[in-house]
Amino acid sequence: MKKITAVAALLCAAGMTGCSLGGSDGDKAQTSADAGGEAVSQETRTDHNVSSEEEPADPLAEAEEVAAMYLKAANAEFDQSMVKLMTDDYAAEYEYMKQNIGHDDEYGDEEEQLSGVKYNFDKEKSGFIDKVNIEEEYSKAAELYVTVSYDSSEGDVTSSQYILMVLDKDNDWKVCFAGTKAQAYTDGIITDENSEAAFANAQVVFESAQKAYDELSKDKDYKFDYLNYISTEKDKFIEKIKSELPNELKESYFTVFLDNGKLDYVVWSEQMGAEISVTYPEKK
């Protein structure tokens, strides 16, 4: 299971900049030969030379096919198969992570690979969405909910994945985000009415934090000793922030981040573990 852990950590780190595989739950592996290089690139390029009258009954079938190949490549050997399935903006960041984390050779023999891997896409929850916030050009966007299950030495294992797909200018489906929906909200990859309301609340918290920070900066007896302050902690900074907040936000869950001793940004959600969690100001 060491290989799974290494790749999941890689994708989780990359996910905060746009690509991830289920936070800490990215689970599945396949040999490099099955998922590597041009083989994956060719297998995931479906035939788009069909007329509108010949479109498949399930309009998300092709997106699901590419997503499944992404999941296979994600837990295989580190190679170009991952990059070829990703939009250019995130491919560069994946390459950077790959070079800095290195290669885990301990999971290379075929008999050590996982078996009985299955993907179950949730047809009711999956579907097309209005937009995703990426720089690349695309004509359609879709969100996929998939449960990955496989056999391991510890028994049957399952994990839930959330994947965002885009149909690019070449009419190819590509993965632009994979992880959890909460993380997609936090990273600003998706937005809706609920997340916009959350963003407005995060702005209020940030502005209150700024007032509290400015006031405490003048207090010679107080020092900002931490890189982040969580709303559930007992600290003069947090107490001062809450005193500035309207009543409906005093019990909300937020984290205040500092950078070089200066207020940087806040991450806000209605409560701990809430699906919608947003960052203000948005991290670029």
Image (tube, rainbow, N blue to C red):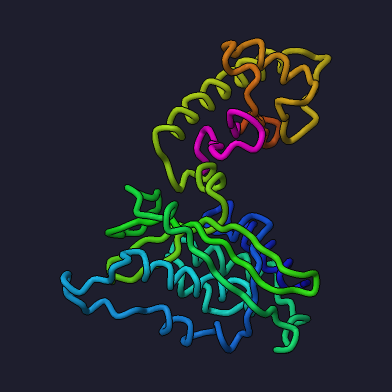
Horizontal side of 28 relative to 1 (left or right) equals left
| Residue 99 screen position, x and y as percent | 64, 71
Which sits in the foreground, 261 or 274? 274
Which sits in the foreground, 247 or 84? 247
User: Is residue 10 highlighted in magenta?
Assistant: no
Does 116 appear above or below 282?
below
User: Which picture quadrant has residue 173?
Assistant: bottom left
User: Which picture quadrant has residue 29?
Assistant: bottom right
The mark total stands at: 0
Q: Is residue 241 visible?
A: yes
| Residue 22 screen position, x and y as percent | 61, 57
Horizontal side of 55 relative to 127 (left or right) equals left
Q: Residue drawn at (56%, 40%), measured in percent from left and top? A: 275
Q: Residue drawn at (30%, 58%), measured in percent from left and top? A: 140
Q: Residue drawn at (53%, 20%), measured in percent from left and top? A: 204
User: Is residue 278 highlighted in magenta?
Assistant: yes
Which sits in the foreground, 4 or 59? 59
Q: Residue drawn at (70%, 82%), measured in percent from left and top? A: 113
Q: Residue furthest right?
A: 221
Horizontal side of 128 relative to 36 (left or right) equals left
Q: Is residue 177 visible?
A: no
Q: Quadrant of the N terminus?
A: bottom right
User: Which picture quadrant has residue 196?
Assistant: top left
| Residue 221 screen position, x and y as percent | 83, 14
Q: Which residues are magenta?
A: 266-284
Does 20 appear above or below 281?
below
| Residue 20 screen position, x and y as percent | 58, 59
